[in-house]
């Protein structure tokens, strides 16, 4: 059980049976009266945000959250299937829940899945992934009319800008936080 004095940015609390994360936090103590805790909360299931002020006497439950390491197996339409690496239990997550992470998922990739009451509500993928370039337009040497990058398509279907020396079949490292090319990977 948390009290209002425990509130801070990043804390996960349960309000009315749903998990919320504190995204902004401000403490104020007026001259007279109780201390006030102004917060901005985001619902971890729906993604909706709202502002709320709490008094020092307010209490919060800890949400029933669990994080498990799971392995991505395959996708079928808009459904993505994962397997728990310990119990071998399989779960399905819809494409909307994965958001931009869909661009980087490859078979057998290990990810962290956040569960609320055994329902998946979030997926954390590695910060850096190595993907193979499947489509690359040839770059004309001496072409100075454009920029010094060209678009390529990687094995997941994601299109990004890379330096002109990257060719089909090359393995590249991508930062999943920004979606940008980092380096060519030698095997």
Image (cartoon, grey):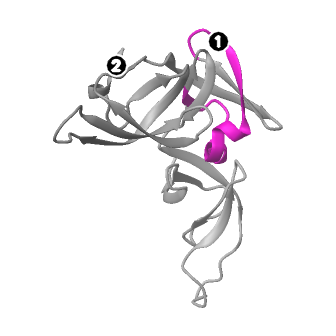
Give the residue drawn at x 61%, y 43%: 101
Is tag 1's residue or tag 2's residue first in the polypeptide sequence? 2
Label 2: state its secondary structure: strand
Residue 178 spot, x, y in % from top left = 50, 56
The residue indicated by pointer 1 is 88
Residue 168 in view in this figure: no
Residue bearing mark 2: 2
What SS does tag 1 mark? loop
Percent coordinates x, y for residue 26 in the rendering: 30, 43
Q: For the view shown, which residue lies furthest in the front direction? A: 32
| Residue at the limit of the structure toward the bottom, as seen here | 145
Q: In front: 52, or 142?
A: 52
Write the start and end of the magenta stretch as one range: 85-113
Which disc number belongs to residue 25?
A: none
Furthest-top residue in view? 87
Image x and y of residue 57, in percent: 30, 22
On screen, 156 above or below 73?
below
Can residue 49 be seen here? The reply is yes
Residue at image coords 64%, 12%: 88
| Magenta segment includes 109 | yes
| Front label number (1 vs 2) | 2
Q: Which quadrant would the N terminus be assigned to in this image?
A: top left
Choose between 154 and 142: the one closer to the eye.
154
| Residue lying at 32% horizontally and 30% vertically, measured from the top left | 55
Give coordinates of residue 132: x percent, y percent.
64, 50
Q: Is residue 49 magenta?
A: no
Q: Are marks 1 and 2 in contact (CB under 8 Å)?
A: no
């Amino acid at each position: 059980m948390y009290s209002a004095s425990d509130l801070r940015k990043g804390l996960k609390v349960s309000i009315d049976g749903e998990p919320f994360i504190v995204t902004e936090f401000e403490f104020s103590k007026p001259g007279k009266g109780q201390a006030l805790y102004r917060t901005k909360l985001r619902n971890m299931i729906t993604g909706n945000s709202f502002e709320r002020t709490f008094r020092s006497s307010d209490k919060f439950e800890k949400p029933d959250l669990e994080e498990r390491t799971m392995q991505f197996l395959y996708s079928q339409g808009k459904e993505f299937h994962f397997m728990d690496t310990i119990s071998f239990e399989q779960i399905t997550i819809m494409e909307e829940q994965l958001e931009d992470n869909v661009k980087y998922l490859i078979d057998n990739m290990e990810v962290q899945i956040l569960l609320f009451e055994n329902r998946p509500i979030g997926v954390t993928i590695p910060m850096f992934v190595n993907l193979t370039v499947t489509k690359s337009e040839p770059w004309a040497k001496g072409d100075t009319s454009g920029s010094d990058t060209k678009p390529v398509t990687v094995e997941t279907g994601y299109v990004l800008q890379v330096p002109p020396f990257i060719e089909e079949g090359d393995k590249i490292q991508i930062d999943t936080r920004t979606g940008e090319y980092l380096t060519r990977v030698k095997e």
